Amino acid sequence: MAKTAPRTDEIRQVSFAADRAHETVEFVRSLREHTAHALPVLWRADLSRLPAPRILFHLAPPTQADRSTTVHTWQETYRYGLLHYRRGPGFLIVRDSRPGAVRKEIVLDRPESVGVFDHFAHPRPLPAADDPSYPSVQNLLTDGLLLAVGGLAVALPYRLHRLPLPIEVLGHG
Protein backbone atom coordinates (compact mmCIF):
# COMPACT_ATOMS: atom_id res chain seq x y z
CA MET A 1 0.00 0.00 0.00
CA ALA A 2 1.00 3.61 -0.47
CA LYS A 3 3.15 5.50 2.01
CA THR A 4 0.20 7.76 2.83
CA ALA A 5 -1.94 4.92 4.16
CA PRO A 6 -3.58 5.79 7.47
CA ARG A 7 -2.29 3.99 10.50
CA THR A 8 -4.83 1.57 11.85
CA ASP A 9 -4.09 2.39 15.50
CA GLU A 10 -4.93 6.11 15.44
CA ILE A 11 -8.20 7.92 14.70
CA ARG A 12 -8.05 10.08 11.59
CA GLN A 13 -10.35 13.12 11.20
CA VAL A 14 -11.69 13.53 7.65
CA SER A 15 -13.58 16.48 6.21
CA PHE A 16 -15.29 16.47 2.84
CA ALA A 17 -14.88 20.24 2.41
CA ALA A 18 -13.66 21.54 -0.96
CA ASP A 19 -10.70 23.30 0.68
CA ARG A 20 -9.48 19.92 1.99
CA ALA A 21 -10.08 18.11 -1.32
CA HIS A 22 -6.61 16.65 -1.85
CA GLU A 23 -6.39 15.29 1.69
CA THR A 24 -9.94 13.93 1.48
CA VAL A 25 -9.70 12.10 -1.84
CA GLU A 26 -6.30 10.69 -0.89
CA PHE A 27 -7.80 9.39 2.36
CA VAL A 28 -10.73 7.84 0.44
CA ARG A 29 -8.25 6.15 -1.92
CA SER A 30 -6.37 4.74 1.04
CA LEU A 31 -9.60 3.72 2.77
CA ARG A 32 -10.65 1.95 -0.44
CA GLU A 33 -7.40 -0.02 -0.45
CA HIS A 34 -7.68 -0.88 3.24
CA THR A 35 -11.28 -2.00 2.74
CA ALA A 36 -10.28 -4.13 -0.27
CA HIS A 37 -7.82 -5.99 1.97
CA ALA A 38 -10.30 -6.08 4.89
CA LEU A 39 -7.94 -4.02 7.06
CA PRO A 40 -9.47 -1.87 9.81
CA VAL A 41 -9.17 1.92 9.81
CA LEU A 42 -10.27 4.12 12.70
CA TRP A 43 -11.59 7.43 11.44
CA ARG A 44 -13.97 10.25 12.26
CA ALA A 45 -15.89 12.12 9.60
CA ASP A 46 -17.49 15.50 9.11
CA LEU A 47 -20.19 14.39 6.67
CA SER A 48 -21.94 17.78 6.54
CA ARG A 49 -20.38 18.63 3.16
CA LEU A 50 -21.04 15.23 1.62
CA PRO A 51 -24.49 15.46 -0.02
CA ALA A 52 -24.98 11.69 -0.43
CA PRO A 53 -22.95 9.73 2.14
CA ARG A 54 -24.38 6.42 0.84
CA ILE A 55 -21.90 6.69 -2.05
CA LEU A 56 -19.27 5.59 0.49
CA PHE A 57 -21.28 2.87 2.28
CA HIS A 58 -19.14 0.16 0.62
CA LEU A 59 -16.08 1.41 2.51
CA ALA A 60 -15.25 0.71 6.15
CA PRO A 61 -17.49 3.14 8.06
CA PRO A 62 -16.22 5.86 10.37
CA THR A 63 -16.25 5.11 14.06
CA GLN A 64 -17.65 8.59 14.78
CA ALA A 65 -19.15 11.42 12.77
CA ASP A 66 -21.23 14.56 13.01
CA ARG A 67 -24.31 12.87 11.51
CA SER A 68 -24.77 10.03 13.97
CA THR A 69 -27.88 8.67 12.21
CA THR A 70 -25.98 8.44 8.92
CA VAL A 71 -23.04 6.72 10.58
CA HIS A 72 -25.35 4.28 12.38
CA THR A 73 -27.01 3.40 9.05
CA TRP A 74 -23.58 3.08 7.43
CA GLN A 75 -22.34 0.80 10.20
CA GLU A 76 -25.49 -1.35 9.97
CA THR A 77 -25.40 -1.52 6.16
CA TYR A 78 -21.68 -2.04 5.53
CA ARG A 79 -20.36 -5.39 4.45
CA TYR A 80 -17.34 -6.36 2.42
CA GLY A 81 -17.89 -6.39 -1.35
CA LEU A 82 -20.77 -3.91 -1.70
CA LEU A 83 -19.06 -2.11 -4.59
CA HIS A 84 -16.32 -4.02 -6.36
CA TYR A 85 -15.03 -4.72 -9.84
CA ARG A 86 -13.59 -7.58 -11.79
CA ARG A 87 -11.30 -7.09 -14.75
CA GLY A 88 -11.46 -9.01 -17.98
CA PRO A 89 -9.51 -8.56 -21.22
CA GLY A 90 -10.35 -4.97 -22.18
CA PHE A 91 -13.35 -4.57 -19.88
CA LEU A 92 -14.47 -4.16 -16.27
CA ILE A 93 -17.60 -5.43 -14.56
CA VAL A 94 -18.62 -3.38 -11.55
CA ARG A 95 -21.09 -4.88 -9.06
CA ASP A 96 -22.95 -2.30 -7.00
CA SER A 97 -24.93 -3.56 -4.00
CA ARG A 98 -24.89 -0.30 -2.05
CA PRO A 99 -28.25 0.79 -0.66
CA GLY A 100 -30.22 2.60 -3.34
CA ALA A 101 -28.01 1.48 -6.23
CA VAL A 102 -29.90 1.93 -9.49
CA ARG A 103 -27.70 -0.32 -11.63
CA LYS A 104 -26.49 -3.49 -9.92
CA GLU A 105 -24.04 -4.37 -12.69
CA ILE A 106 -22.14 -1.84 -14.76
CA VAL A 107 -20.00 -3.00 -17.66
CA LEU A 108 -17.19 -0.73 -18.82
CA ASP A 109 -16.24 -2.13 -22.19
CA ARG A 110 -15.13 0.89 -24.16
CA PRO A 111 -11.37 1.57 -24.05
CA GLU A 112 -11.93 5.21 -23.05
CA SER A 113 -14.20 4.21 -20.13
CA VAL A 114 -11.73 1.61 -18.84
CA GLY A 115 -8.90 4.11 -19.27
CA VAL A 116 -10.74 6.81 -17.33
CA PHE A 117 -11.61 4.36 -14.55
CA ASP A 118 -7.94 3.32 -14.29
CA HIS A 119 -6.82 6.96 -14.42
CA PHE A 120 -8.87 7.76 -11.31
CA ALA A 121 -7.45 4.87 -9.26
CA HIS A 122 -5.44 7.71 -7.71
CA PRO A 123 -6.81 11.21 -7.06
CA ARG A 124 -6.80 13.32 -10.20
CA PRO A 125 -8.28 16.65 -11.29
CA LEU A 126 -11.64 16.48 -13.03
CA PRO A 127 -11.37 17.26 -16.76
CA ALA A 128 -12.79 20.36 -18.39
CA ALA A 129 -15.97 20.02 -20.45
CA ASP A 130 -14.00 20.17 -23.72
CA ASP A 131 -11.69 17.29 -22.71
CA PRO A 132 -12.32 14.05 -24.68
CA SER A 133 -12.59 12.09 -21.41
CA TYR A 134 -15.33 14.37 -20.03
CA PRO A 135 -18.32 12.20 -21.13
CA SER A 136 -16.79 9.05 -19.60
CA VAL A 137 -16.03 10.89 -16.36
CA GLN A 138 -19.60 12.20 -16.21
CA ASN A 139 -20.94 8.65 -16.70
CA LEU A 140 -18.75 7.35 -13.84
CA LEU A 141 -19.89 10.22 -11.60
CA THR A 142 -23.55 9.59 -12.46
CA ASP A 143 -23.16 5.88 -11.66
CA GLY A 144 -21.51 6.74 -8.32
CA LEU A 145 -18.20 5.14 -9.28
CA LEU A 146 -16.18 8.30 -8.67
CA LEU A 147 -16.13 10.60 -5.64
CA ALA A 148 -15.58 14.25 -6.58
CA VAL A 149 -14.50 16.81 -4.00
CA GLY A 150 -13.26 20.30 -4.82
CA GLY A 151 -12.36 19.59 -8.45
CA LEU A 152 -10.58 16.30 -7.68
CA ALA A 153 -11.94 12.79 -8.07
CA VAL A 154 -11.02 9.23 -7.14
CA ALA A 155 -12.50 5.85 -8.16
CA LEU A 156 -14.62 4.18 -5.49
CA PRO A 157 -14.94 0.47 -6.44
CA TYR A 158 -12.24 -1.86 -5.23
CA ARG A 159 -10.93 -5.14 -6.49
CA LEU A 160 -11.83 -8.02 -4.20
CA HIS A 161 -8.92 -9.63 -2.40
CA ARG A 162 -11.09 -12.23 -0.72
CA LEU A 163 -14.47 -13.68 -1.60
CA PRO A 164 -17.42 -12.36 0.38
CA LEU A 165 -19.32 -15.51 1.30
CA PRO A 166 -22.81 -15.36 2.79
CA ILE A 167 -23.07 -17.16 6.12
CA GLU A 168 -25.50 -19.65 4.54
CA VAL A 169 -22.71 -20.97 2.29
CA LEU A 170 -20.70 -21.87 5.37
CA GLY A 171 -23.61 -23.83 6.84
CA HIS A 172 -24.24 -21.40 9.71
CA GLY A 173 -27.36 -19.67 8.49
Image: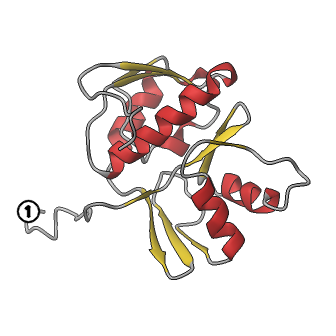
- The quarter in which the N terminus is drawn is top left
Q: Residue furthest front?
A: 3
Q: Secondary structure at mark 1?
A: loop
Residue 103 higher or lower than 51, as above or below: below
Q: Amino acid at mark 1?
A: His
What is the quadrant of the C terminus in the image? bottom left
Q: Is residue 163 left or right of residue 86?
A: left
Q: Residue at point 41% right, 56% down?
A: 82
User: Residue 122, percent across and down?
Assistant: 55, 46
Between residue 150 and residue 5, name the one nearer to us.
5
**Residue 38 vs residue 125, the one in the foreground:** 125
- How crowded pointer 1 is (Cα within 10 Å; few <14, some 14-19, many 20+) is rated as few
Image position of 61 with respect to 158: above or below: above
The answer to whether one can see residue 78 in this image is: no
Query: Quick check: can you spot residue 1?
Result: yes
Q: Position of residue 172 (x, y in %)?
A: 8, 62
User: Total marks drawn?
Assistant: 1
Q: Which residue is painted at 33% across and 40% down in the image?
A: 76
Residue at which label 1 appears: 172
Q: Nearer the viewer, residue 162 or 115?
A: 115
Q: What residue appears at the point 45 percent right and 43 percent down from the top-left corner?
A: 57
